[in-house]
């Protein structure tokens, strides 16, 4: 008749989520509890006896380490984590604690242990680590963007102040430029690593000035996605061109056409964006301003310095044109075209 201790042990072994095991003598598996089959995916009798069947289940990268650990259990309790490969190919993580069983003579006659499936806990831990790393990267990106954004805003405010004749002109120009900068920020901050579409930048700026593509306005070019820094600078350039067109050109009168065309061509270092802004059929000449303001400086000098761009500005009897070429380090194949900006 079984003793109370044996009854208790069998009841515990049948109901616990852990696998109980016994090596007796050490190196020979004499017992595994009922949970073994569910956790390891094979019947218990396939591992009873010498440990070759158990070692075959171990992930190859963990096999030798576990073999050495089993030897260490003859001297002291040992905690070890390892992977098994079930017959169905599923890989599971096991946390195993083995300890020597010492008899009355001080001899180790057997080794016992408790094994638990910790795969779900491992996956949760990995997910948390990935989430923490993603959060760290997002925070670093946010800090970088904030520093850059503040730098651009300071530059806009300073340069606008230098080129404004009075407070009213300063306030009006600053408001428009900050609004243009805010619009492109909304595009590039939609998601981590987001880029801004050139067409969307142009369309948003035109709409902000009550203009849109139609009979008098033509936008033509491939889909081009710009990284943050390039998008920010080009959005300011498009704002200056639009504001000037409202004040002096086609968007401020009843006649004229606005054609904005762009393309992307491969270069030795990546690609080059070519953009042409042309105001025509105005019925009157547009003269080059006597003094160079913020907009002119941005379009002709700042872009060259900040983006290594090349530009040309032309005032004619019947309109105005501005051509810009900007190096783009990385552009998708679908964004490349072989045509040139049309005059």
Image (tube, rainbow, N blue to C red):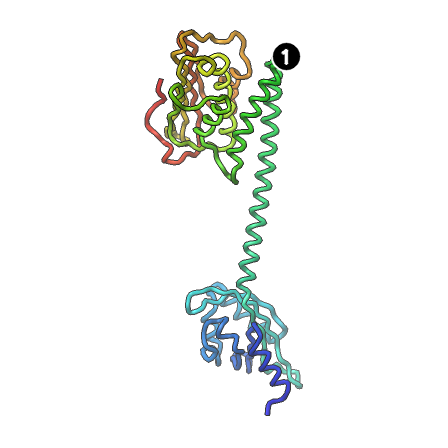
> Quadrant of the image for the C terminus?
top left
- Residue 47: x percent and y percent? 47, 77
**Identity of the residue furthest to the bottom in this view:** 1
> Could you say which quadrant of the image residue 155 lies in?
top right
Residue sitting farthest toward the left = 338
Number of labelled discs?
A: 1
Q: Residues within 10 Å of mark 1 (few under 14, many from 20)?
A: few
40 horizontally vs 112: left or right: left
- Up/down of 116 relative to 210, above or below: below
Look at mark 1 in the image and give the residue it sits on.
166
In the rendered structure, the answer to whether residue 26 lies left or right of residue 261 reads right
Residue 158's x, y, as percent?
A: 62, 20
Q: Does the rendering let one see residue 218?
A: yes
Q: Secondary structure at mark 1?
A: loop
| Depth order, front residue of 136/205 | 205
Q: In the image, residue 224 lies at what x, y percent?
A: 42, 31
* Front residue of this view, candidates 194 and 340: 194
Residue at 34 percent across and 29 percent down: it is: 337
Q: Residue at x 52, y 40 (%)?
A: 191
Quadrant containing the N terminus in the rendered view: bottom right
User: Which of the 4 quarters of the picture holds residue 216?
Assistant: top left
């Amino acid at each position: 008749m079984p003793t109370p201790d044996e009854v208790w042990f069998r009841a515990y072994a049948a109901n616990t989520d852990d696998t109980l095991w016994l090596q007796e003598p050490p190196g020979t598996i004499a017992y595994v509890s009922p949970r073994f089959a569910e956790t390891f995916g094979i019947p218990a009798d396939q591992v009873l006896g010498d440990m070759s069947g158990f070692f075959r289940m171990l992930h190859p990268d963990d096999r030798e380490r576990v073999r050495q650990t089993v030897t260490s259990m003859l001297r002291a309790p040992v905690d070890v984590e390892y992977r098994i490969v079930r017959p169905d190919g599923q890989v599971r993580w096991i946390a195993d604690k083995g300890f020597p069983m010492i008899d009355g003579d001080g001899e180790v006659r057997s080794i016992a242990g408790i094994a638990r499936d910790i795969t779900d806990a491992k996956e949760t831990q990995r997910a948390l680590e990935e989430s923490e790393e993603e959060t760290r990267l997002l925070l670093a990106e946010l800090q970088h963007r904030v520093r850059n954004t503040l730098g651009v805003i300071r530059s806009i405010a300073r340069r606008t102040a230098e080129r404004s004749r009075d407070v009213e002109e300063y306030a009006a120009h600053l408001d428009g430029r900050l609004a243009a900068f805010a619009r492109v920020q909304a595009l590039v901050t939609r998601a981590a690593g987001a880029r801004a579409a050139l067409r969307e930048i142009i369309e948003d700026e035109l709409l902000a000035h009550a203009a849109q593509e139609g009979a008098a306005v033509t936008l033509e070019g491939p889909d081009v996605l710009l990284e943050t820094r390039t998008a920010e600078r080009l959005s300011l350039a498009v704002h200056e061109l639009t504001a000037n067109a409202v004040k002096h050109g086609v968007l401020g009168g009843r006649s004229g056409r606005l054609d904005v065309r762009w393309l992307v061509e491969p270069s030795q270092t990546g690609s080059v964006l070519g953009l042409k802004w042309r105001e025509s059929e105005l019925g009157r000449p547009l003269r080059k301003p006597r003094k160079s303001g913020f907009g002119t400086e941005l379009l002709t000098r700042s872009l060259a310095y900040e983006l290594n761009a090349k530009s040309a500005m032309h005032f004619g009897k019947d309109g105005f044109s501005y051509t810009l070429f900007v190096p783009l380090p990385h552009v998708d194949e679908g964004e490349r075209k072989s045509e040139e900006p049309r005059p």
